[in-house]
Amino acid sequence: MKRSLLSLIFLCSIFANAQETGESSLGTWHMYFGTNKISDRFSIHTEGQLRYFEQADNFNQLLLRTGLNYHLNPNTIATMGYGYITTDGSFEEFPDEINTKEHRIFEQLILKNKVWEFLFEHRYRLEQRFLDFGETTDTQHRARYRLQVTLPLTDVFFLNFYDEIFLNLQDEVFGQNRLYAALGINVTHNLSVQAGYLKNHFSTANFDRLQIGVTYNPDLRGIFKKDNSGS
C-alpha cells in the first residue's frame, strides 16, 4: 500500500512539473522564410517566427532573422546574418515578468545534393549569442547541424523531414534536438506552404509543436538592375 501511494505521488509530481513547464501542451510555431534574390550571386535572407506554448496562445518566443547569402553555385550557399529574439521561458504567467532578449550573429553554410528523387540539404551554423536577462547579461556560443530531406510527391505536393542538433561550445555540450516531419504544397514556383509536427528535445524537457510555415522566394534582380541603370 505504501509503495503504491509513493508511486502515485511520484506520477503526480511528474504531471505537475509537465504542466508548469508546458510539456503537456501542444504548442504552435508560425513561420515565414524568404530568399530574396538581388543578383546572380547574392540574395537576402528574411525570416520571422512567432512561437506559442499552446495553440496560438501563451506567448513563448518572437524570432526575427536576416542575412546576406552568397551563392557559390546552385548547391552551395554561404550566409552571414543577424537575429533578434525575445523569449518568455516560463509557461505560467507572472506579474512584472521580464522576457529574455537576445542579439545573435551567425555564420552558415548550406550544401545540397540529390539522390534518386530525394533532395538532401546539409546546414552548418555557428552562432554568437548576446543574452540580456534583465538584471544580468551573458555571451554564449553554439554550433548547429541540420540534415533535411525533401521528397517531391507531385509537382504540387512534397514531404519534408529534418533533424537538427544544437551543441553548446561551453558548459554542457548538448543543447537540444529538433525532429520534424511535414506535408508541403507548392502554391507557385516561388511560394510554398508547409504544415508539420516538431519534437523538440532538451536534456530536461520535451515539447510537441505544430508548425505552419510559408516560404516565399522572390526574384528581385530586375528591380535592382533598373535602379542601377537609372543611376
Image (cartoon, rainbow, N blue to C red):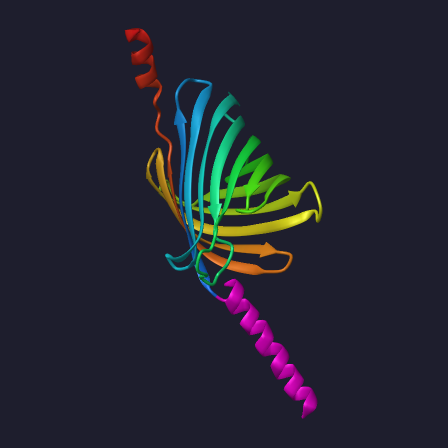
Image quadrant containing the N terminus: bottom right
Q: Is residue 77 above or below residue 133?
A: above
Question: Is residue 94 or residue 58 the one in the foreground?
Answer: 94
Q: Main secondary structure of the magenta part?
A: helix
Q: Is residue 109 above or below residue 161?
A: above
Percent from the top left, x then y, of residue 67?
Answer: 47, 29
Image quadrant containing the C terminus: top left
Percent from the top left, x then y, of residue 165?
Answer: 61, 46
Q: Residue placed farthest to the bottom in the image?
A: 1
Position of residue 105 in the picture relative to residue 195 (left or right): right
Q: Is residue 221 above or below residue 158?
A: above
Q: Which image quadrant is residue 37 in?
A: top left
Percent from the top left, x then y, of residue 82?
Answer: 50, 32
Question: Is residue 99 or residue 156 the one in the foreground?
Answer: 99
Q: Say whether residue 116 is visible.
A: no
Q: Residue at x 56, y 41 (%)?
A: 131
Q: Residue at x 69, y 40 (%)?
A: 169
Position of residue 188 in the picture relative to residue 86 (left or right): left
Q: Which image quadrant is residue 155 in?
A: top left
Asked if residue 106 lies in the magenta stretch, the reply is no
Question: Is residue 175 or residue 145 the one in the foreground?
Answer: 175
Point out the stretch of residues depicted in magenta: 1-24
Q: Which image quadrant is residue 36 in?
A: top left
Asked if residue 14 lies in the magenta stretch, the reply is yes
Q: Say whether residue 40 is visible.
A: yes
